[in-house]
Image (cartoon, rainbow, N blue to C red):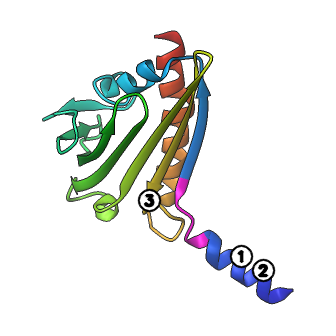
Amino acid sequence: MDNSIKLTKVLDKDTNYKKQLEVNASAKEVFFALNEGLHSWWGKISNSEFKAGGQFTIHFKNTYWWTFKIIEHTPNQELIWKCIDGEPDFNKEWIGHVLHWQIEEQNRKSMINFHQIGLTPNIDCYEICSTTWDRFISSSLKEFLERG
C-alpha cells in the first residue's frame, strides 16, 4: 500500500493544469473572448493575428509578457497556442508550453475546457500560475462573458 501512495504522488507531480468552466454564453461569444476579447479579461494584447499560424503577445501591468503562436484556430470550437517567447527576467518556464482551449455549446450555455501542457506541480511557478489561472478563468473570463 505504501508503494501505491508513492506512485500516486509521482503521477500527481506530472499532472498538467486543467480547468473546466460552464458559462451562460454561446460558443461564438466564448471564441471571441479567447481571441480579440483577450484584453477584456486577461491582459493587453499586441502584435496579434488571430488565425492558425498567427501569433499574439499578452502584456500585464507588472511588465511581464508572453508571445504565443496559434497552432489550431477552429472557430467556436478549439484553440491551441504554443508559448514561443516571454519576459526574460520572469518565468521562462512557460516557453514551449501548449495552451489548449475547447468549447462545447448546448442550449446557449458553453462548457470551456482549458489545459496547459507543461504547467505541472514540479515547476517553480506552478503555485502562482495555477492560482492566477483559477482567478482569470473562474472570475475574469466568466464575468466578461456573463456580464459584459
- For mark 3, give the secondary structure: strand
x 44%, y 66%: residue: 124
The image quarter containing residue 43 is top left
Disc number placed over residue 8 in the picture, else none: 1
The segment highlighted magenta reads: 13-17
- Residue occupied by mark 3: 117
As helix, strand or loop, the secondary structure at mark 2 comes to: helix
- How would you rate the neighbour count of disc 1 (Cα within 10 Å): few for under 14, some for 14-19, many for 20 or more? few
User: Is 1 contained in the magenta span?
Assistant: no
Q: In what quadrant of the picture does the C terminus appear?
A: top left
In the image, what residue type sits under mark 3?
Answer: Ile
Report if the CB atoms under discs 3 and 2 are less than 8 Å apart. Answer: no
Q: CA distance from mark 3 to mark 2?
A: 24 Å
Looking at the picture, which amino acid does disc 2 mark? Ile
Tell me where residue 33 appears, x and y as whole percent.
38, 24
Q: Residue furthest left?
A: 47
Which residue: 68% across, 76% down? 9
Image vertical order of residue 111 relative to residue 9, above or below: above
Pointer 3 or 2: first along the chain: 2
Q: Indicate the position of residue 1 as horizontal and vertical percent values.
A: 86, 86
> Given this view, does label 3 or label 2 mark the residue nearer the observer?
3
Disc 2 and disc 1 in contact, CB within 8 angstroms: yes
Q: Which residue is mark 2?
A: 5
**Residue 47, image x, y percentages:** 13, 35
Q: Is residue 49 left or right of residue 31?
A: left
- Measuring 48% from the left and 40% from the top, which residue is drawn there? 102
SS majority, magenta = loop
Q: Residue at x 57, y 32 (%)?
A: 138
Q: Between residue 49 and residue 83, name the one nearer to us.
A: 49
Q: Is residue 36 above or below residue 86?
A: above
Q: Dot 2, crowdedness within 10 Å: few (<14), some or many (≥20)?
A: few
Along the viewing direction, whichever of 105 and 55 lies nearer the viewer: 105
